[in-house]
Image: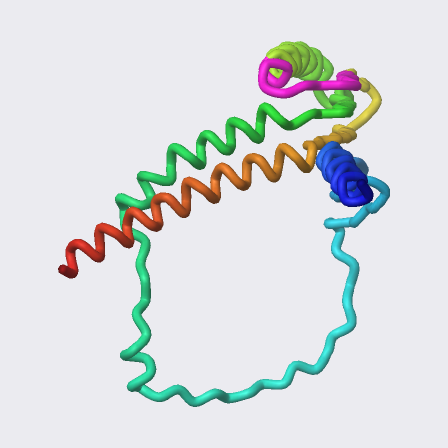
Amino acid sequence: MSGWIAVGLAAIMIVLIGLVRCAVEVEYGDSELTVTLRLALFRITVYPVRPRRKKAVRKEKKRRDGESRDKKKRQTIRLSQIRSLISPALNALASLMRSLCIGEMTVYHVTPGLADPSGAALAYGREQAACGVAVAVMENLFTIGKREIRTAVDFTAMEARIFVRLNISVRLCSLVRIAAALAFEVLKVYWESRKAEGKAAE
């Protein structure tokens, strides 16, 4: 009885871990870019990279015999193998895009209009049209939660101002499923190539 309870608890834990979302948060403003990776309660700043202390690297010289080099065979990727992997890679990319969720998409852009007010007004109209098209395309590709896009014209400014914040997430179970499917296709192509090489050697 206790064994079944342990199996049930393990299954519940696996399901809960699979439901955890892995998120990438991107924020740009005042000419500064910040990229953060978030997994459950853990946050890792990917960019900007924190400076690390330089450690002394010991350079070791290794001598290799010419005979050992001749014995090692370098495997090259053939064009047929690359063609066989294009379709699985595209399928994995499509599955990943369907699994992605944009939790937050915030964009603020201010067009300067002090130097050329009429040109700034025209640019503002083009930005509004471009934003409408871009949002429609993204809504067809991704699931978008909070969305806030604002554009404006400042006739007293000389430089443009922009602020962008994106939160893109995907469940761990989706990543594992996509990676497993892609790995299966890669192994399939690899074993087929090995069989073909074996038959050619015979």
Quadrant occupied by the C terminus? bottom left
| x and y percentages locating residue 80 in the rendered image | 26, 44
In percent of width and height, residue 63 lies at 43, 89
Q: Which residues are magenta?
A: 137-151
In this rendering, would 65 be left or right of 133?
left
Residue drawn at (86%, 42%), measured in percent from left and top? Answer: 41
In reply to whether residue 179 is colored magenta, the answer given is: no
The number of callouts visible is 0
Q: Main secondary structure of the magenta part?
A: strand
Of 31 and 113, nearer the camera is: 31
Q: Nearer the viewer, residue 131 or 196?
A: 196
Residue pictured at 78% horizontal, 49% vertical: 45
Along the viewing direction, whichever of 198 and 76 lies nearer the viewer: 198
Residue 31 seen in the figure: no
- The answer to whether one can see residue 84 in this image is yes
* Position above or below: 59 against 182: below
Q: Is residue 104 above or below residue 153?
A: below
| Image quarter of the N terminus | top right
